[in-house]
Image (cartoon, rainbow, N blue to C red):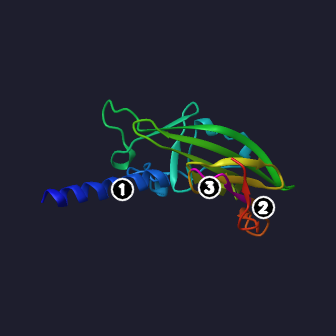
Amino acid sequence: MELLSRVLSIVLFAVAGSIAQTGYSATPPVHFDPAQTPVLPCDDVTKLDFRNLTFQVGPRTFAFHEGVAVNYDGRDGQAGRYSQPDWKAEIEKDSVIQPVPDVVVRFLLIHDVHVTGSGWRYYATGYHCSGGKLQEVIHREGMSLRVERLDSVSIDISLDPLPGKARRKLCSYIWDRSSRKYVLSSTPEHSSVRP
């Protein structure tokens, strides 16, 4: 029985180490039902105050107040009485780009830190106004995400797919006129940048 207990402990330790190395958290950030997030009216994306706005970033909802959004790991992301937030997000980059003459995109880089545990996540996202509503036109997230280029030609984002590797994987996104969103460009499969 003692041998079985030791083997089980080793297996659990190995699984936990593997999860930590790949960047997955046993307790992921709280994800809200998109139906809970109001549809945001939008006529001019440059005039929106994202630092004081609740909006959807991919599957995640952030409720920013004075530039900070907090979330809780508890049921439905709700804080218990006197509870300390588990996650704290801040907008690190807020830029306006114009991929084509008739489109203005607001690009945000959000850094979300697990303040009561270990881990963090970056969210690279972009929005524009379409049909009077705010629409997300690019979304990428990851622990090692870094914005390498941000201009009217492309948005280049690099990721570190394997910790300790000398090269980062580069993904280049370009504006697609037909879908009116950013799409992954046909860059070579092994595009990389130095750390």
The CA distance from mark 1 to mark 2 is 42 Å
> Is 159 placed above or below 81 here?
below
Looking at the image, tell me whether mark 3 or mark 2 is earlier in sequence order.
Answer: 3
x and y percentages locating residue 122 in the rendered image: 58, 46
Give the label, 1 or 3, closer to the camera. Answer: 1
The CA distance from mark 1 to mark 3 is 29 Å
Residue 3 horizontal side relative to residue 180, left or right: left
Q: Residue furthest front?
A: 3
Q: How many neighbours does mark 1 have within 10 angstroms: few (below 14), some (14-19), or many (20 or more)?
A: few
Instruction: Identify residue for label 2.
Output: 175
Residue 98, magenta (yes or no): no
Q: Give the amino acid type for the residue marked by disc 3 in the picture.
A: Arg
Instruction: Identify residue for label 3.
Output: 140
Kindly identify the residue that appears in the image at 17 percent across and 59 percent down: 3
SS under mark 1: helix
SS under mark 3: strand
Looking at the image, tell me whether mark 1 or mark 3 is earlier in sequence order.
Answer: 1
Residue 167, magenta (yes or no): yes
Q: Give the amino acid type for the residue marked by disc 2 in the picture.
A: Trp
Residue 85 seen: yes
In the rendered structure, which segment of residues is drawn in magenta?
164-172
Give the label, 3 or 2, closer to the camera. Answer: 3
Residue 114 horizontal side relative to residue 79, left or right: right
Q: How many neighbours does mark 2 have within 10 angstroms: few (below 14), some (14-19), or many (20 or more)?
A: many
User: Where is the N terminus found, in terms of image quarters?
Assistant: bottom left
